[in-house]
Amino acid sequence: MCGIIGYIGPKDNLELGMNSLKRLEYRGYDSAGMAIIEEGKISSERVAGKVNELREKLKERDSEGTPCLFHSRWATHGKPTKENAHPQFDCKREVAVVHNGIIENHKELKEMLEKEGHEFSSETDTETIAHLVEKFQGEGSSLEDAVRKTMELIRGAYGIAVISTKDPEKIVAARMSSPVIVSSNKEGGFVASDPAAIVEHSSKMIFLEDGELAVIKRGGVEVTDMAKRKKEKEEVRIDWDIKEAQKSGYPHFMIKEIMEQPETIENTLRGRIIKEDGDVKLGGLEQVREELKGVEKLTLLACGTSYYASMIGKFLIEEIAGIPTEVDLASEFRYRKRPYGRREAFAFISQSGETADTLKALEEVNNKGALSLGIVNVVGSSISRYTDAGIYNHAGPEIGVASTKAFTSQLAVLTLFSVFLGRQRNLSLNEGREILEKLESLPSKVREVLEKKDEIKEVAKKYGEYENFLFMGRRYNFPTALEGALKLKEISYIHAEGYSAAEMKHGAIALIDESFPAFAIALSDSMREKMVSNIEEIRARSGPVIILGTEGDEGIKEYGEDSILIPEVTEPLSPLLSVVPLQLFAYYVAVSKGFDPDKPRNLSKVVTVE
């Protein structure tokens, strides 16, 4: 969840490091810091606060030393203070460490080290790593061997980068259940926790596996395992344009990414639709095509927004492909005993491909020998490497912590996947063609919705001061309601409940009064009449209602104080359209309250700890 940057080379280290760190701020922003080796000593700056505060501290500084480390923190152990900010140091300040993850046995290691005379200056688990490296270097080990011995002692999840004045011409990085990317070219050597940090300087990257260690020097990278065996690693090409990871004139990444959705959906669909055959080409599934024909049950596993996309995916797969489908929270999956079917497959859905809970669930499935599939956005990510086959979203980098374009691209992928599976079974050519034609029309309809942003902004201003909210929908748009509530909670800090409108009267309706508005997704589909009945139940209890309806259905307006109408869309594809006003509503509420939607409190973009 923290952001890590390491650099060794000839370029201006401060400018490079700060620009790279800024692109990782979405991973953690309660404190930040940097350390460099200058004239044989470690020099550092740390702040309790956001990356810009670190930048201000460094403005007057002229620093040419490398190697250097930069870090943005999402606190796990210890409050967000300057002392707990990274890098963390050993007793003599000869070792500096940046870390993403959690060291589970840090207390017992700290007790051992204190008995040996080590003095600690922070509350963090990370400082333990620095003192262990100090200990092993003091016994004569090289920096990489000291890190390797440290890895043998620590338990938990970590991605680390380490520098030492005793071995100043290298950075050593290591990984266990937390992403680490390394690269080397004529601009120097790099280590990062996310490709977005260094894509400006290197499009070819090496993704470390668990238990691997990398030595990054000016002239190259060497990767070894715990037994010191050299590993031949494939370089993965990242085709992101650096402009994609910048705001491009928008005030926030979130609104930029909401507005990009017509293009990201087009990118997800591009080259995959075979309209004349009513079929789909998914190159990442070709190697398991025959195996998928025999699948009789599918389980989708994900967390957060991806979990809600999976809930919609269940409807799609069952309706289009006719395969019984379950949806499981990845965080709970491995803590229950479940039978595995002989013809069951598992799909793991994650924007980053690094979500810790989803990776642990994947490990469980792989240990059982079941077929595993990945639906991820980040090329080369852990889920993409550890699954048997998979599909990339092609949505480009998503920087906003509250996921938007990744959600709609996931829905587009799940629709393609459903048609792919359906055409292997009983979905006819004409049925497949009809679904795909309607799917191709979605980007233009999303553009029409985005043109209503000023209208949605006015509705958001009107409701921004309420302290509670209910989002409700039925069938395909029940998960959309959950996602709408999540967005409002994430960035506006308003208590919001997402409900199946039918379930509301089984408890949640007790909360409704004039101070508890509802956002009702009441499109012109199979559930319209049911939704109207549920809306009437809200109105009977004086609850204000915002209607999300379908253009041409003027009658739906009478059921709400306010209404937003979107283009007509076939029911299975409606969440791709109906979620967009909910995203905009949450964004404009947050802005009206003076909050930064890109940096919601207590949240991080990539959850790499359980």
Image (cartoon, rainbow, N blue to C red):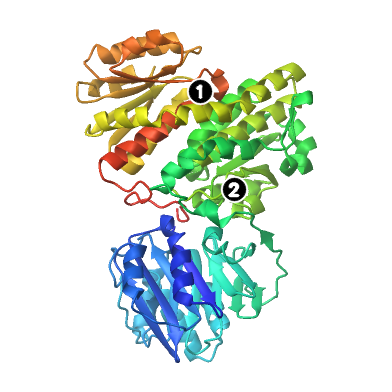
Residue 253 on image: x %, y %? 43, 48
Residue 356 on image: x %, y %? 50, 52
Is label 1 in a helix, a strand or a loop? Answer: loop
- Splitting the image into 4 quarters, where does residue 326 fall? top right
| Residue shown at 38% from the left, 48% from the top | 251
- Splitting the image into 4 quarters, where does residue 84 fall? bottom left
- Splitting the image into 4 quarters, where does residue 143 fall? bottom right
Label 1 environment density (alpha carbons within 10 Å; few <14, some 14–19, many ≥20): many
Label 2 environment density (alpha carbons within 10 Å; few <14, some 14–19, many ≥20): many
Q: Which residue is mark 1?
A: 476
Question: Alpha-carbon distance for marks 2 and 1?
Answer: 26 Å
Tell me if 419 is positioned left or right of 188 in this view. right
Question: Could you tell me the amino acid type at mark 1?
Answer: Tyr
Tell me if 538 is positioned left or right of 484 in this view. left
Q: Please state, as top left, top right, bottom left or bottom right, where the N terminus lies in the image.
A: bottom left
Of callouts 2 and 1, the N-terminal one? 2
Is label 2 in a helix, a strand or a loop? Answer: helix
The vertical placement of 353 against 564, above or below, is below
Please say if the residues under marks 2 and 1 sit with CB atoms less than 8 Å apart.
Answer: no
Q: Quick one: 408 or 141, which is closer to the camera?
A: 408
Residue 2 on image: x %, y %? 43, 61
Tell me if 258 is positioned left or right of 44 in this view. right
Q: Quick one: 262 or 142, which is closer to the camera?
A: 262
Q: Which residue is mark 2?
A: 362
Question: Could you tell me the amino acid type at mark 2?
Answer: Leu
Q: Quick one: 355 or 267, which is closer to the camera?
A: 267
The vertical placement of 94 against 1, above or below, is below
| Residue shown at 33% from the left, 60% from the top | 30
For residue 335, which numbered disc appears in the image?
none
Res. 329 visible in picture: no
The vertical placement of 5 against 345, above or below, is below
| Residue shown at 47% from the left, 88% from the top | 165
